[in-house]
Image (cartoon, helix red, strand yellow):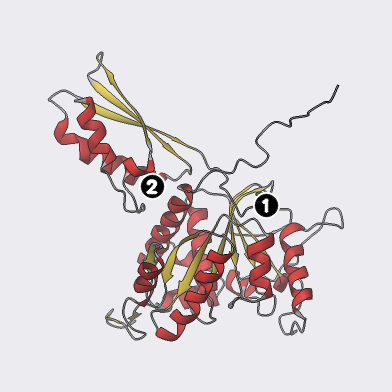
């Protein structure tokens, strides 16, 4: 019976995963207690999420319920811990940031910043400690979308405190310059400013830092990909052919610099009529899905062009979406993203003791 239960559990696939539990090696033990006629199933996860845990327990319970005899029961113990994952060769994770996830697009105007903020907000609502860094030096949008023009403070005149917005730790060049001022900088200056924003901000023990990357594959993107310890990346695109061309370039860039791609988000998949709710694929159908399949990466989700999202971020109130169906879509995408990241190797840099060889 125990073997049948293990086989049934190994065949379970949760909506947020792209593999079955057996492939993910998440079932650690199944023990039988004669005293109360019950099985105890222990599951290990590399991230903590009540929503994911509830879905996992429900799926596992449904899988083994037909196997249990009358009077028998099962309980589930989930050992979950947010861990740091492996980054590019030659780099190691930052001390106060477990995982950095870069959100890129290759092309502007596809809703990358909107997606970044909503994914960060969804992760925060799941109980993770989350930060978001606006890496668009020339066109920062975070201050407007987050509804704040607060200036960063410094306690030592060397570093900056992140701006806290509704539980999100945030930083942007837009917090340091006037909104009307154009940043007329050459690439080396922009790269230096971005590096300083990341390294000189006193991030407070983040589980995830979402970096909203500028569009394209230029100097800033290469610096992010080669010098900043990124655990994974997400590509945002619309279904439109012209956007897919540049999204492929973004995927190619991440592949070349050894940054794993956690998945593709297809934004503006359909337009939702605000009067009748009818959805129409005005930019084409399943372009992001085809891109994900061709690139052999997961499709994290498809998002509609919804006026509520635009209104919420124009007003700097991302939390206004919390009770909506669109928030559930962002939640699902965010959990798929961290679930896929959890399948990556853990970080072991700096975990080994220092070995000193003495010649005598």
Please name which of the two marks, 2 or 1, marks the residue nearer to the observer: 1
Residue 150 visible, this angle: yes
Measured in 3D between alpha carbons, the distance from the residue under mark 2 to the one under mark 1, in whole angstroms, is 33 Å
- Quadrant containing the C terminus in the rendered view: top right
- Quadrant containing the N terminus in the rendered view: top left
Q: Residue furthest top?
A: 35
Residue 216 or residue 132, whichever sits in front: 216
User: Disc 1 designates what residue?
Assistant: 90
**Dot placed on the residue nearer the N-terminal end, 2 or 1:** 2
Instruction: Relative to 98, say whether 304 is above or below.
Output: below
Is 170 on the left-hand or right-hand side of 56?
right
Quarter of the rendering containing residue 162: bottom right
Quarter of the rendering containing residue 144: bottom right
User: Is label 1 in a helix, a strand or a loop?
Assistant: loop
**Label 2, residues with CA under 10 Å away: few <14, some 14-19, many ≥20:** many
Find residue 100 and report its horizontal and vertical position in percent: 59, 56
Q: Residue furthest front?
A: 360
Instruction: Relative to 251, say whether 36 is above or below.
Output: above
Find residue 102 and name its label: none
Is 345 on the left-hand or right-hand side of 72?
right
Q: Residue furthest left?
A: 70
Q: Residue at x 49, y 48 (%)?
A: 344
User: Is label 2 in a helix, a strand or a loop?
Assistant: helix
User: Disc 2 designates what residue?
Assistant: 52
Instruction: Relative to 182, say whether 149 is above or below.
Output: above
Q: Look at the numbered discs 2 and 1 and tell me whether their residues touch, using CB distance below 8 Å.
A: no
**Label 1, residues with CA under 10 Å away: few <14, some 14-19, many ≥20:** few
Find residue 107 and report its horizontal and vertical position in percent: 53, 80
Residue 91 or residue 186, whichever sits in front: 91
């Amino acid at each position: 019976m125990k073997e049948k239960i293990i086989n049934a559990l190994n065949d379970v696939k949760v909506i947020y995963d792209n593999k079955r539990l057996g492939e993910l090696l998440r079932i650690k033990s199944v023990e039988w207690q004669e005293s109360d006629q019950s099985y105890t199933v222990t599951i290990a996860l590399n991230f903590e999420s009540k929503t994911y845990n509830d879905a996992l327990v429900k799926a596992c319970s449904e899988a083994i319920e037909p196997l249990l005899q009358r009077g028998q029961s099962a309980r589930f113990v989930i050992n979950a811990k947010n861990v740091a994952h492996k980054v590019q060769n030659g780099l190691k994770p930052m001390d106060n940031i477990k995982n950095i996830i870069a959100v890129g697009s290759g092309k502007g105007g596809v809703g990358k910043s909107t997606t970044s903020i909503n994914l960060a907000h969804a992760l925060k609502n799941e109980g993770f400690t989350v930060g978001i860094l606006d890496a668009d030096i020339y066109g920062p949008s975070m201050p407007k979308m987050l509804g704040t023009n607060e200036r960063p403070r410094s306690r030592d005149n060397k570093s900056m405190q992140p701006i806290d917005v509704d539980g999100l730790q945030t930083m942007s060049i837009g917090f340091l310059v006037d909104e009307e001022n154009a940043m007329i900088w050459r690439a080396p200056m922009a790269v230096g400013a971005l590096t300083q924003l990341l390294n000189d901000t006193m991030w407070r023990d983040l589980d995830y830092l979402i970096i909203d990357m500028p569009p394209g594959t230029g100097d800033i993107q290469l610096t992010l990909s080669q010098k900043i310890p990124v655990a994974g990346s997400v590509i945002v695109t619309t279904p439109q052919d012209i956007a897919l061309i540049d999204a492929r370039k973004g995927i190619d860039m991440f592949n070349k610099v050894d940054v794993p791609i956690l998945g593709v988000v297809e934004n503006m998949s359909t337009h939702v009529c605000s009067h009748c709710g009818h959805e129409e694929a005005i930019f084409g159908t399943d372009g992001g899905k085809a891109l994900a399949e061709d690139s052999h990466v997961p499709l994290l989700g498809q998002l509609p062009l919804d006026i509520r999202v635009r209104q919420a971020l124009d007003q700097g109130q991302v939390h206004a979406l919390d009770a909506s169906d669109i928030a559930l879509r962002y939640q699902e995408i965010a959990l798929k993203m961290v679930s896929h990241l959890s399948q990556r190797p853990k970080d072991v840099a700096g975990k080994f003791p220092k070995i000193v060889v003495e010649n005598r």
